[in-house]
Amino acid sequence: MRSLHIKARIASAGVTRDAVARQAGYHPSLFSRVINGLRLPPPDFEQRVNAALDMLERAERAAAAARERILTGSER
């Protein structure tokens, strides 16, 4: 598993590990142990985490765009 890749994606997405864990369907403590190399990942771990990160990144981009529209007054 590429835990460094996952950690980097989490950092660049601006989301919390807990949010990623929950979106992927894992308890945050299990998620933490896996990405820190303390436990072997479940069979589909990387696929589920990447899918969760894809969704959370889209949500963050949409939220940022909405904030920008509101702050610039183009929401009217």
Image (cartoon, helix red, strand yellow):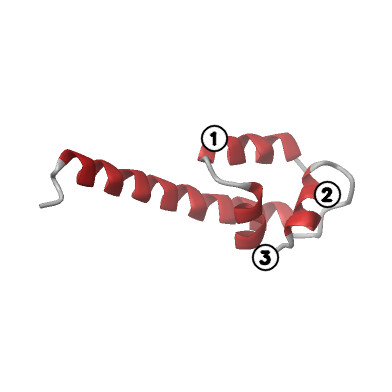
- Rate crowding at label 1 as few (under 14), some (14 to 19) or many (20 or more) other CA atoms within 10 Å: few
Name the residue rendered at 81%, 59% in the picture.
42
Callout 1, which amino acid?
A: Ser
Percent position of residue 12, x then y: 54, 35
Q: Which residue lies furthest to the left in this view?
A: 76
Sequence-first tag of 1 and 3: 1
Read off the residue under disc 3: 25
Name the residue rendered at 63%, 34% in the picture.
8
Percent position of residue 20, x then y: 62, 53
Callout 2, which amino acid?
A: Arg
Q: Is residue 42 left or right of residue 15?
A: right
Callout 3, which amino acid?
A: Gly
Disc 1 element: helix
Disc 3 element: loop
Instruction: Give the label on residue 12, or none.
Output: 1
Percent position of residue 44, x then y: 74, 59
Read off the residue under disc 2: 33
Sequence-first tag of 3 and 2: 3
Percent position of residue 1, x then y: 78, 43
Q: Report how far apart the C-alphas of labels 1 and 3 lie in the structure.
A: 21 Å
